[in-house]
Amino acid sequence: MNIPLAFIEAGSDWRAQIRALPRAEAARLATRARQAPLFAHAYAFHLNFRFGGMAPPDLLGFAVEQGLVGVKIHVDDGEAASLRAMPHTALQGFGAEARALGLAVHVETSTTAEDDLAQAVAIAQVVGASSLRCYPRYEGRVSEIIARATEDLRRLERFDPGGQMRFTLEQHEDLTSTELVGIIERIGNRRLSLLFDFGNMINAFETPLAALAIQAPYITEVHVKDCLIVPDRDGWAHLACVSGAGHLPMQALLVELLLLGSDLPQVTAFGLEEEEAYFAPALRFPSDQPDPFIPARSQSYTDPGTGDLARRLVREAAAARVQVATVRAMLVDIAAEADDQRNRP
């Protein structure tokens, strides 16, 4: 089955997007592209955390090396060395090191289940995190998943009564953008917003720019990556790849995200989540009946393959550095095009 070009390319001419902007908006875009808050994401080192002895403090070093403003790290990254496995004093030390380096910390977890979410919030509070990402990972009918996630997320105010953190709900391959927005609106917690991932809507049979348009009023954080869109049964899977080598309209997405918010940027963090070789199957299909069933699934993992693991770890670390340069180059091009638009007679 061929992927329709319209699926990939609709609305993806980012230069035309910018040329259609009023001068004031183009000026705002240029400034925001130059000041985009880029975060290191631990998943860019997923295999190094699992097999290469990488630990959370190493991600802080990478962020400093690359001139990034913060880190996004899952409670389980590093397994035996992870935030979840750290004693209280080590968590305090990690947070203190991040603050000394001038880095923001965002913590992530792959659940909304009460006990696990409460533990993730507690970890985030000890390290001084300003944000916690979550997503539901339930088996069941879509209506059941929505109901359970909504009930879970209503507890956030109880877990963080002092209002220390923001919380983000990520589209993670099963729920559609409209369903996610419905959860946010039903809960009505001003500290709960959406995290937009560049590729995760593919598995829910949505296109990137269309998904962004639906989620836009509630997006405050982003995972930046690229992927190939792979036909899977009568839906779409995604196979993550090196940024700039896939099917996603990365520059067009960056333009739209940078423009969100009038006086202040709405998006406060762009996590650089290079995920080369991560595969996620289709979960929603055009042939779905109302209220389809979503099967059980694990947290995200990348298969290291059967080749030379040491070489694979080196390649992953190199790719993380290249992604920083690639995204920065995209932002430079966006800023330059916006400057041209602002200065047109």
Image (cartoon, rainbow, N blue to C red):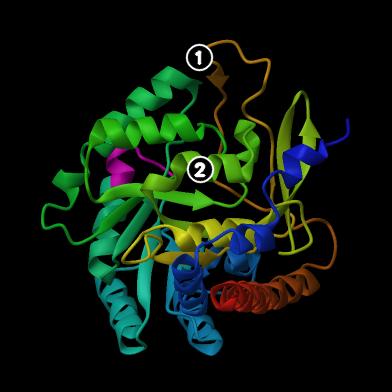
Q: Does the magenta-highlighted stretch encompass residue 113? A: yes
Instruction: Say if 190 sits above or below 114 in the image.
Output: below
State which region is magenta.
Answer: 110-117
First of labels 1, 2 by sequence position: 2
**Coordinates of residue 293 in the picture (x, y in percent):** 55, 18
Taking the spot 44% from the left edge, 51% from the top edge, the residue there is 195
Q: Which of 291 and 93 is in front in this view?
A: 291
Query: Do the residues under discs 1 and 2 have CB atoms within 8 angstroms?
Result: no
Give the residue pinned by disc 1: 291
**Residue 159 image label:** none
**As drawn, 130 above or below 322:** above
Q: Hey, which quadrant is residue 208 in on the image?
A: top right
Front residue (pair 313, 238): 238
Type of the residue with mark 2 = Ala
The span from disc 1 to disc 2 (Cα, nearest Å) is: 23 Å
x, y percent for residue 177: 49, 35
Total numbered labels: 2
- Please state, as top left, top right, bottom left or bottom right, where the C terminus lies in the image: bottom right
- Determine the secondary structure under disc 2: helix
- The answer to which quarter of the image holds residue 187 is top left
* In the depicted structure, whether residue 314 falls above or below residue 72: below
Q: Position of residue 194 (x, y in %)?
A: 40, 47
Between marks 1 and 2 in the image, the one whose residue lies nearer the viewer: 2
Residue 125 within the segment the image draws in magenta? no
Secondary structure at badge 1 equals loop
Q: Which of 157 and 201 is in front in this view?
A: 201
